[in-house]
Image: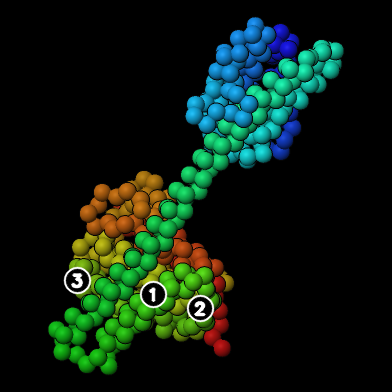
Amino acid sequence: MHRFLFNNRDELIARCKAKVAQRPLRAATDKQLAHGVPMFLDQLTRTLAAEDEDELDLSIAISGPSGGDTLALSEIGVSATAHGKELLNLGYTVDQVVHDYGDLCQAITDLAFERDAPFAVVEFRTLNRCLDNAIADAVTEFSSQRDAQISVQHLAGEKQRLGFLVHELRNSLGTATLAVRALELGNMAISGATGAVLKRSLSTLGLLISRATAEVRGEGADQRQTFSVASFIADVDLVARLDVARRGAVFEVRTVDPSLAILANRDLLHAALANLLQNAFKYTQENSMVTLSAYASGEHVLIDVEDHCGGLPPGGAAKMFIPFRPNNDIRAGLGLGLSIARQSIEADNGTLTVRDVPGSGCVFTISLPLRSLE
């Protein structure tokens, strides 16, 4: 058999490549073949030649004993392990890893039948041993690497969810702290507008904790409601006034049509818009204006936050909503605020976009379906 394999090496590789190409969305590549069929075919040929020369130790060193070797991989084991990792990186599934080696077995059998080349039973036994060891090692590495990738992705997701919760808790706590300071400095009654801000912030803190608890329990509920955009913007204005007072910016809220309404999770949308305003207050140039406006545009309500940060750097808009993005600006936090805002808005079937105004600033726009007040 080893002479047959040596003489028909190119034909067998071509047949295997053709078999791979017949599978949906899969094609044999140079990367895939690097530790795959050609190398395995050469190792199989050398194993058979060693056995033909009664060099059993060499045969085992190349292909491993029956059932493999848990202590030390053979040559076939080492290359099959690398092959399994490569196929995972190429997006293959575990069954396609098995098919890769099965293709060669079928190609050998088919070509031998066509050429009327008889093989001894002992040679088929060696072929099966080599295939068994190669498949086992390739699948083991494939599965190990896949499990590692899933674990990394899971940890990244958990880190992001925890980061989102911490960010929102910090924002609500910060607003509550500002409200308390304002009440103390102004000796104001808690029943007034500033007291209402404090109460809303404490309520949001409770909602965030309840939502996190429900997520841990696997519970969830639709908390969306239809509400007046003008009333919503007025609430946001109260909170924003506390923040802008210590930022050195000018804040303007434009008049909103009282007939406009939207369907959304009011608390999450409030937090999202607060994030946009905090971002604007942080980056707008000193004594420049931040503008908040809400208006109808066709079948949607648009809420704009415009600042005067001087404009975005090249490619800045594309990176704006990436969580945990690197940022050397000392004013930057974890890079979560805009990402959280976009996710909250998209959960209400809306969109959040940013438009650069070169040399001036940028405009963040929330778009949500227009509703009518009943």
Query: How far apart in space, not on screen, are marks 1 and 2 (Cα)?
Result: 15 Å
Q: Which is more toward the observer, 11 or 240?
A: 11
> Closer to us: mark 1 or mark 3?
1
Q: Is residue 306 above or below residue 81?
A: below
- Quadrant of residue 233 within the rendered picture: bottom left
Give the quarter of the figure containing the C terminus: bottom right
Label 2, on which residue?
223
Q: Secondary structure at mark 1?
A: helix
Earlier-in-chain disc, 1 versus 2: 1
Give the residue type at disc 3: Arg
Label 1, on which residue?
209
Residue 235: x percent and y percent?
A: 36, 81
Task: Please give the name of the residue rendered at 60% of the width and 24% of the height, measured from the top-left corner.
Answer: 65
Task: Please give the name of the residue rendered at 39% of the width and 46% of the height, measured from the top-left corner.
Answer: 315
Label 3, on which residue?
246
Mark 2 surroundings within 10 Å by alpha-carbon count, few (fewer than 14), some (14 through 19), many (20 or more): few
Q: Which is more toward the observer, 37 or 249?
A: 37
